[in-house]
Every structure is written in structure tokens, then in C-alpha cells.
Image (cartoon, rainbow, N blue to C red):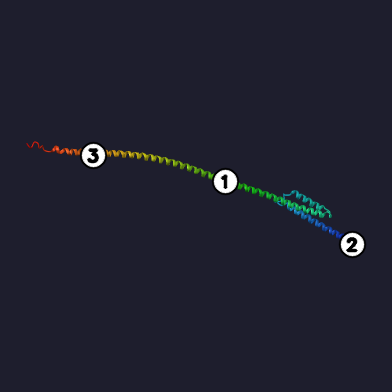
Amino acid sequence: MKRSTAILAAVALALATLGSAHARQDDIDISRLTGSLDQLANDPGMGSYAQAEQARARDAINRLAQASSRERPHALYLAERRVDLAKTAAQLQDAQLKLTQLDREHDQILLDNSRRDAELARRELERQRLQYQLAQEEAARLQAQGQEYSQAADQARAEAERAKKLAAAQSKVARAAKRQAELAAQAAKAMRSQMEADKPAEAGPDTSKQHP
């Protein structure tokens, strides 16, 4: 009788110890999963992501806490998967948002580059336009200068032609004057010769009166 009582007491103690161990294990799993989920919820970078998944994971932890020993393994598995899914969903959403931000930054960089290229192209076009305008002005100046030179050359040729004609006329007049001078000199010489030839006859003695 005493032996049976001792055996029953030992079995009861063993069951109590086993139940206490299971209870402690339940508390450890629940604390671990709750702490992991709280860490995600309090994360400043990802805490606001995957709110639906976080709520489902917290419900799974609550069902684990209320599950019987028979349902506990399945409830623990579901709770762990829900917590893992909440973390993965939050990380995925964070990565997607960062990727979207990177795409926006990339688009902004491309836009800035396009604007910078457009500004450089505009400046280059303005520089070429100004250069072309200066070239046109220089060409017009040279053309006007060429016209002035051409007019001056024409005027110089006209003046040279007039000077040539005047020189020819002066030369003709000079030749005529020279000819007249030569003729006058010849006439004067002829007159002097005639006067010299006539002079002895006028000054000679009258021989007809000296001899009878």
C-alpha cells in the first residue's frame, strides 16, 4: 500500500515537473517570438512597414499562448513562420522603398544631367551664334572697306588719267611753244642776218664822186 502510494506520488511529481518544464518552454518561446516582433515594431527604419503581417504574427503568438499541449507544436510553428514573414515583408518593403528612392535619385540625376547638357548646348549655340554674327559684321566691314578701296582706286585711276591727259596737253603746248620759239629764233636770226647783210652797203664810201 505504501509502495503504491509512493509510486503514484512519484508519477504525480514527474508529471508536475514535466508540466512545469513545458510551461517554462512555452514562456521562453512566447517571450522569444514577442521580443523578436517587438524589436521589428520598434525599429525606426522598418517598424512602420508590413503592419498587416506584424498583426497576424502577434495573433499567432497569442494563439500559441492559449494553445493546448497537443496544439502547441503546430501553433509554435505557425507563430514562428508569421514572425519570420513579418520580418521578411518589412525588409522587402524597406528594400522596395529604397529601390524606389534610388530610382527617383537616378531619374533626378538623369534630369539634372539632361538640364546641364541642355544648358551647355544652349551656351555653345549662343557662342556659335555670336561668333557667326561677329564674322558677318567683319565680312560686312571688309566688304565696305573693299568698296571704299575700290572707289578710291577708281578715283585714283581717274585722277591719274586726268593727270595723264593734262600732262599730254601740257607737253603738246610745250612742244608748240618750243616750236614757236624755234621759229621765232629762226626768224630773229634771219632778220639779224638780213640786217648785217644790209649794213655794209649803207655805211660804204661813194666812189662815184671821188673819180671824174
Of 147 and 206, nearer the camera is: 206
Q: What residue type is labelled 1?
A: Ala
Amino acid tagged 3: Gln
Label 2 or label 1, whichever comes before in sequence order: 2
* Sooner in the amino-acid sequence: mark 3 or mark 1: 1
Residue drawn at 59 percent across, 47 percent down:
117
**In whole angstroms, how far apart are the C-alphas of marks 3 and 1?**
94 Å
Estimate the spatial distance between the alpha carbons at disc 2 and disc 1, rounded to whole Å. 98 Å
Report which residue position mark 3 lands on. 186
Q: Nearer the viewer, residue 190 or 118?
A: 190
Give the CA distance from mark 2 to mark 3.
Answer: 191 Å
Front of the two marks 2 and 3: 3
Mark carried by residue 121: 1
Residue 123 as seen in the image, left or right of residue 171: right
Q: Quadrant of the N terminus?
A: bottom right
Instruction: Please tell me in which quadrant of the rendered image residue 208 appears.
Output: top left
Q: Could you tell me which residue is drawn at 62 percent across and 48 percent down?
A: 110
